[in-house]
Amino acid sequence: MSTRVLRWRPLEGTGLEHLELTEEADRVLARSVLIGERDGLAFGLRYEVELSPSWLVRSLAVERTDGAVLRLESDGQGRWLLDGEAARELDGCLDIDISGTPFSNTLPIRRCGLAEGAPQRFRMAWVPLDTLRPFADGQVYTRLGERRFRYQSEDGSFERVIETDGEGFVTLYPGLFERV
């Protein structure tokens, strides 16, 4: 078993994320606390992501400080339960993308071993912090080098080149986050 601590701060506004990642023989567990401000609204929450040893999402639990809760479970084949009920709108999603944290970017990077220069499309279960109502979102990742990846929204409305450490954890997400 190994545990490491990662922290990120937003590049605009105030906030901090503190994540503890534990890798065990039968699972990877990420537990995080996130505080910040987005669009003038202060927020606080904690989340827990359980992954298989190959970094496939098994479950996500999010709880905001105002009491709002989200629970997602995955069968690893692209079928999801949302608060215990089938979530057909998420069919085909293997990964999650939690708004407000760069940790989510690590999931497809670690799981897929992306080939340099070859764009790969993903269908993500995107979780906005304001509503906690997940929806499917198309995303494209392209490895640009050993530690650099282009992230694009499938519709072309957003693009960034993110930098990672040797294990695929974001160190710089221009305009949004940096590791501290």
Image: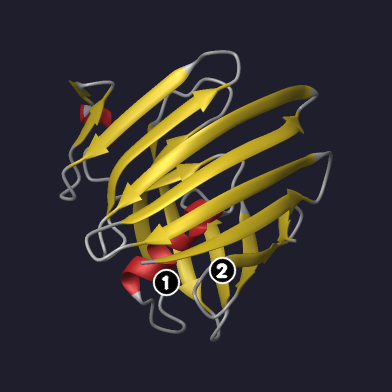
- The residue wearing badge 1 is 119
Query: As displayed, is residue 163 above or below residue 133?
Result: below
Which of these two is toward me, 102 or 159? Answer: 102
Q: Quadrant of residue 49?
A: top left
Which residue type does callout 1 highlight? Pro
Q: Is residue 13 left or right of residue 20?
A: right
Residue 80 in the image: x percent, y percent? 22, 35
Label 1: which secondary element: loop
Residue 97 in the image: x percent, y percent? 46, 45
Query: As displayed, is residue 111 above or below residue 79?
Result: below
Q: Do residues under tags 2 and 1 come within 8 Å of each other at their CB atoms?
A: yes
Q: Which residue is rendered at x = 64% and y = 61% of the image?
A: 160
Residue 69 in the image: x percent, y percent? 44, 20
For marks 2 and 1, give the CA distance: 9 Å
Residue 123 in the image: x percent, y percent? 34, 49
* Neighbours of disc 1 within 10 Å: few (<14), some (14-19), many (20+): some
- The residue wearing badge 2 is 150
- Look at the image and tell me whether residue 2 can be seen: yes
